Amino acid sequence: MMLCSIKEWSEEKYPPWAHGPGYVVSYDIAKAVYNRFNEGRLKMFKLEDVAMDIWIDDMKKEGLDVRYEKEERIFTEGCKDGYVIAHYQSPREMMCLWQKLQETKRARCCDDP
């Protein structure tokens, strides 16, 4: 399913890196994005996760060593203990997550005791 116009993205499908609610990149990739941005070499895109995917895919084609690692703590369907990302949280749940993190120094969901 195409979520943008052909003018915005002419390829058959997005690069495989898109993960919407959260992703983590290494220092070398963050630095490469920063450098390319400062050099005016990055095509901007309206969705930042898709933009990051496009940029990483281009850097990979240029020879940057890029590896995709599935991180099970990036849970895209709510909250899971030990999370890196807790997606689809209400403002009240976000406040609860933050309070639990501050009090316990652990990533715990709010429906847990």
Image: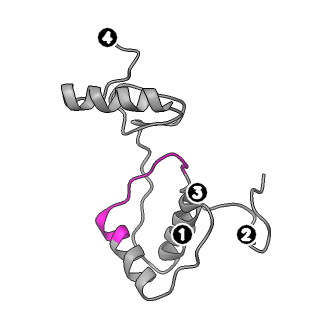
Check disc 1 and give the amino acid type: Asp
Q: Is residue 90 magenta?
A: no
Asked whether 66 or 27 is in front, the reply is 27
Q: Which residue is mark 4?
A: 113
Q: Position of residue 59 (x, y in %)?
A: 48, 75
Specify the quadrant of the image occupied by residue 67: bottom left
- Residue ID at (39%, 70%): 65
Q: Is residue 22 magenta?
A: yes
Quadrant where the C terminus sits is top left
Check disc 4 and give the amino acid type: Pro
Q: For marks 1 and 3, give the CA distance.
A: 8 Å
Mark number, residue 57: 1
Question: Which SS type dominates the magenta stretch?
Answer: loop
> In what element is the residue under mark 1?
helix
The residues colored magenta run: 19-30
Check disc 2 and give the amino acid type: Glu
Q: Which residue is mark 3?
A: 16
Q: For marks 3 and 2, give the CA distance.
A: 12 Å
Foreground label between 2 and 4: 4
Q: Earlier in the sequence, mark 1 or mark 2?
A: 2
- Residue ID at (22%, 32%): 102
Q: Which residue is mark 2?
A: 11
Specify the quadrant of the image occupied by residue 64: bottom left
Foreground label between 4 and 3: 4
Q: For marks 2 and 4, give the CA distance.
A: 47 Å
Q: Earlier in the sequence, mark 1 or mark 3?
A: 3
Q: For marks 1 and 2, give the CA distance.
A: 12 Å
Q: Position of residue 40 (x, y in %)?
A: 49, 87
Q: Earlier in the sequence, mark 2 or mark 4?
A: 2
Q: Earlier in the sequence, mark 4 or mark 3?
A: 3
